């Protein structure tokens, strides 16, 4: 039984993340998309909101579940019995950080293996921070995120207050 975890901030989830999730779901028997809730950084969406947002997009994928975790990733792996971490690789910049994390997680918990999936070429430029930047000015994010979550993102920036596009 190959049980994998795909951890990340997903703030918000992008088409790049979804591509990785759907491809990973065909490789592993069970996949948990794990919304990490331990960052110092202030998030646009709460962990529960991010979990709901992602769950709503995956109704048709039967071997994927979505959860959140506020602790160390390896502890989630130990508790859940998962021994594979899936990460997406966009650029060489991702690689340096990812390699460091993979080695550290392996040192902390020997059975854990990190598997990297290369990003779909068309999403290799895409990150949640680019989405947030565009959305904060009321920009068009329809090529970046699934259509169904656009209203939630727009609504959040309406609450926060949109930035002025002309400065
Ligand atoms: P983190 O804060 O842990 O990097 P992210 O939500 O930014 O969380 O990313 C989660 C995972 O998804 C990481 O492995 C990251 O490299 C990958 N990822 C981010 N953006 C994309 C994308 N556009 N295409 C494919 N993978 C991506």
Image (cartoon, rainbow, N blue to C red):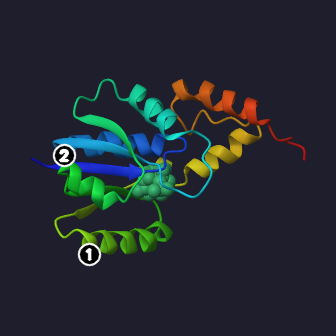
Residue 26 rendering spot, x and y as whole percentages: 22, 41
Earlier sequence position, callout 1 versus callout 2: 2
Residue extending farthest left: 1
The answer to whether residue 148 is left or right of residue 100 is right
What residue lies at 47% left-to-right and 40% top-to-bottom? 15
Secondary structure at badge 1 equals helix
What residue lies at 21% left-to-right and 63% top-to-bottom? 112
On screen, residue 92 above or below 60:
below
On screen, residue 40 above or below 21:
below
What residue lies at 55% left-to-right and 54% top-to-bottom? 125
Numbered circle sitting on residue 133 = none
Q: What is the crowding at mark 2: few (fewer than 14 residues within 10 Å), some, or many (at least 20)?
A: some
Q: Tell which of 114 and 126 is nearer to you.
A: 114
Residue 40 rendering spot, x and y as whole percentages: 57, 58
What residue lies at 36% left-to-right and 57% top-to-bottom? 87
Numbered circle sitting on residue 28 = 2
CA separation in Å, label 1 and label 2:
23 Å
The answer to whether residue 111 is left or right of residue 66 is left
Numbered circle sitting on residue 107 = 1
On screen, residue 62 above or below 13:
above
From the image, state whether disc 1 or disc 2 is nearer to you: 1
Q: Which image quadrant for residue 154?
A: top right
Q: Tell which of 161 and 71 is nearer to you.
A: 71
């Amino acid at each position: 039984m190959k049980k994998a975890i795909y951890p990340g901030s997903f703030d918000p989830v992008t088409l790049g993340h979804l591509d990785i999730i759907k491809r990973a779901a065909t490789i592993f028997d069970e996949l948990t998309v794990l919304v990490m809730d331990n960052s110092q950084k202030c998030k646009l969406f709460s962990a529960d909101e991010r979990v709901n947002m992602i769950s709503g997009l995956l109704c048709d994928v039967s071997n994927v579940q979505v959860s959140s975790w506020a602790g160390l990733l390896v502890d989630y792996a130990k508790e859940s019995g998962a021994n594979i971490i899936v990460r997406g690789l966009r650029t060489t910049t991702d690689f340096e950080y990812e390699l460091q994390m993979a080695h550290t997680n392996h040192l902390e918990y020997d059975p854990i293996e990190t598997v990297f999936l290369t990003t779909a070429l068309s999403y290799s430029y895409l990150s949640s921070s680019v989405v947030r930047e565009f959305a904060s000015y009321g920009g068009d994010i329809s090529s970046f995120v699934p259509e169904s979550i656009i209203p939630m993102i727009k609504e959040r920036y309406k609450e926060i207050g949109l930035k002025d596009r002309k400065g």
